[in-house]
Amino acid sequence: MSQAEGRSRARRSRRVTPPGARRWHAGVFLAPALILLLAIVLYPLAYSIVRSLFNDTPSGGAGSWVGLSNYKHLFTDSTTLRALKNNVIWVLVAPTVVTILGLIFAVLSERIRWATVFKTVLFMPMAISGLASAITFSLIYADQPSRGLANTVTVGIHDIFEGSSRYPGLHPRDASVLEGSDKSGFTTKAAVTPGAVVMLPLTGLDLTSPPSSTAQAVTPTAGTGVTGVVWNDFALGGGGTTGSVDHGERGLGGMTIQALSQGKVVATTKADADGDFSFPSLTSGSYELRLPASNFAAAFNGLSWLGPNLITPAIILAWLWIYAGFAMVLLAAGMSALPRDALEAARVDGATEWQVFRRVTAPLLAPVLLVVFVTLVINVLKVFDIVFVIEQSAGANGKYGDVLAVSLYQDFGDQQYGLASAIGVFLVLLVIPAVVSNIRRFRRDQQ
Amino acid sequence: MRKGRAVYLGIAMTATLSVVAACGSSSSGGSPSTSATSSSSSSGLGNFSGQSFTVLGQWTGEEQAAFQNVLKGFDQATGAKAHYTAAAGGDEATVLGAKVNGGTPPDVATISLPGALAQYASAGKLVPVSAAGQQATADNFATEWATLGSYKGTLYGVPIDAANKSTIWYNTTAFSNAGISTPPTTWPALIQDAKTLSDSGVKVPISVGGGDGWTLTDWFENVYIRTAGLADYDKLTHHQIPWTDPSVTKALDTLKQIWGDPTLIGSASAALKVPFTGSVDNVFKANPTSAMVYEASFVASTITGDKDPAQVGTTAKFFGFPSIDGSAPVLEASGDFAVAFSKKPVVQAFLTYLASPQAAQELVSFSGSGFLSANKNLSTSAYPNATLGQLGQQLVSVGNNFRFDMSDQAPAAFGGTPNKGEWADLQSFLANGNVQQAEQALERDAKNATGWSS
């Protein structure tokens, strides 16, 4: 190459590239980002793919080549399958609901006064750390109505319609006198005849703080008809004779007693505070006495929000609370960019607000809606923190809320890196279509 | 399973990465030179004036203070300087693993899992205990403890503290309300007393913390060691017999006599939501709903730490896990071992010191930690209260008739992960009482887990 030729080429190339932007300049400036990307994204990704094809030694090292068996495990093991199923529920429900909610809020926020306050309040959960939100919701979902807001409300509503029974948990002292269960009620085994005094001993009353409807039990004297005493045959500190009324044993006032003849209820009465009851009308024949189940029904304690069935919906609800504001803000921004004249034109032409929304706003907003939706799908696929933290307070039922990211974390903690890598790679595969669709849309928008 | 590991696992992930470097490393205090010369000759450990070494442990708070009390004693005796660091988030296994794999192990680490000790020893990371240390361990501990600290016949770990895992804690008020004057000593008596408690109005006589799977594995292990005996316990520990073995069936059937009876433990679905701390609080809170709870000696610390109104020793007492079918006295125990990653002579001297009655005394006498020691030459009077003394005495008097927590010796995927493996299988068993299904699930999960020690 001659000197002149080289010089001219240099001149030519200088003409093409902008001033000061030589190729190596670009390289120098890109290098830190590239190195970081290589070191903390590409290398771990590649290593995870490789590692997912090996099993594990006891100390967590890579064992021998097992091909796709870790992936097979992912689809056959009941634990990861359950996590996979939950992920499917999440993806199907959460992004859709959040996008719709966000749209509703965005439209509403254009219509109401105090819109800024409304938006700020709705967006606030986004500003709270996921950990704090999750802890807040685990408290809301706590079982005891005295602690968990959700159950306080549920029990409050329930008790408006149906009160609780007086003596939950009480059971017969002696199975040879009374038989049955607290579901069916307890019935006397022996036949009862008029003139006799019937002893109905129960136990299980909380003696440290007995209810006010109870008092020292008294054995009644025989009178006309059937008389008897229903009492808690246990005194504080024990002692006393089984089946007879002793000092310190309390009558179960307000207990409902039914008299049955050939399986039919012929009379009903309630015991006094000292446990005495009588059926003066039963003067002949033979009867059975029954303590119906309504006496023993356990108090309604609300729903098991973090139980096997409700845990995933409950966590999704917490997630909605966080992300509804996010969707709303993005969609509201999109709406403010809509051409006002199109909306005005439609209104001038006599379209109703619903028609304006359906025919004008929604189609124009479609690109933003899709971006929000896809972003949420990606977010939901890798959801971890909120599930993991709420699960901690669910005890043994936590496993029913597992998602793949949580399974990954557990396998990692157990030094089963092969399995964990397989789950990680699978999650990446799931996210890729969503990411590709987002990138495509960006490109199209640029063109 | 040691309490805490499961809970902290979550925090540990993130915390490990960021906090480990910044974690407070504190000196054990006391200037090395002051007392070094005076006492080093009498201790027989040698003079290590000015030499320092690092100790990694999982203890924080009162437990850390008690352990540092021991380090201080060593420093004063030898002039050395020990630096203790508590593993971030309390998850020492992860922190230690990261440090060892990263090539910067501490000089000494405490290990609560014999399996982990074997792992590090087989990888050649550990330095065997010196002859003097071996002698001290042999002199002061039952041989079973030395066996637990050994790998292939070589002693690597010196026992530090121990927990007595065969204790049932009860509320004395609830017992006297029910007219029970002496706690039960046999399984049928336990069931009978629980029924009496139910009659006296206690809603859930036996509080079961089924929300944490490890409390259930401890229940099972205590029953199994009594119905199957020590030999089978050892075999099952190393998965040399399957979980479908008749001995497991017998233990589960026995366990079902209590777990399967709602009069005794309340509804199983409710028990499955109660974490360990909740199960203790249910017995010792202001208006208790339960009368007794099974777990280890550290229940005492929980009662104190949770500020329950009951007082350990007066209204909160314990009795030993009852004998089943006339079984001889046995204990389930757990504990921590000190292992050396460094060849420094001062480190070996420290391990030797840890095995001494003096170190044990410095450890347990520190009120508030609830530490026990299996050191047989430790005087019971060293304990800050009679209850702890009694618990420690049991550990010593049982000799070799104890076994280490079985699930702590299993691979973590089987015996140490919330809602997985043995924890989840026993939770299902508590829920449905199906012995056969439980055995099959246990055997399947045991087979899936790799890394059984032999």
Image (tube, rainbow, N blue to C red):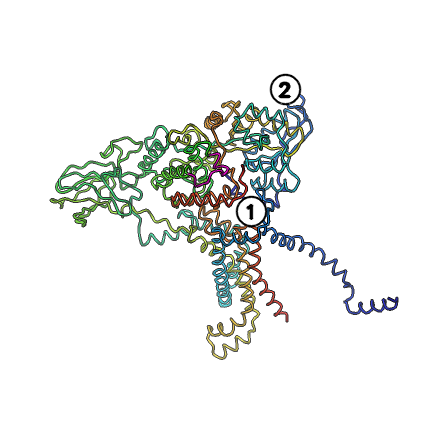
Identify the disc placed on residue B42.
Answer: 2
Q: Position of residue B373 (x, y in %)?
A: 52, 28
**Dot 2: chain letter:** B
**Dot 1: chain letter:** A
Q: Which corner quadrant of the image does residue A186 belong to?
A: top left
Q: Name the residue type under label 1.
A: Gln
Which structural element holds mark 1? loop
Instruction: Report whether B267 appears left or right of A244.
Output: right
Neighbour class for label 2 at 10 Å: few (<14), some, many (≥20)?
A: few
Res A252 seen here: yes
Mark 1 highlights which residue? A416
Q: Main secondary structure of the magenta part?
A: loop
Which structural element holds mark 2? helix
B235 in the magenta segment:
yes
Outermost residue to the bottom: A349
CB under 8 Å between discs 1 and 2: no
Look at 65% across and 53% down and name the residue there.
A43
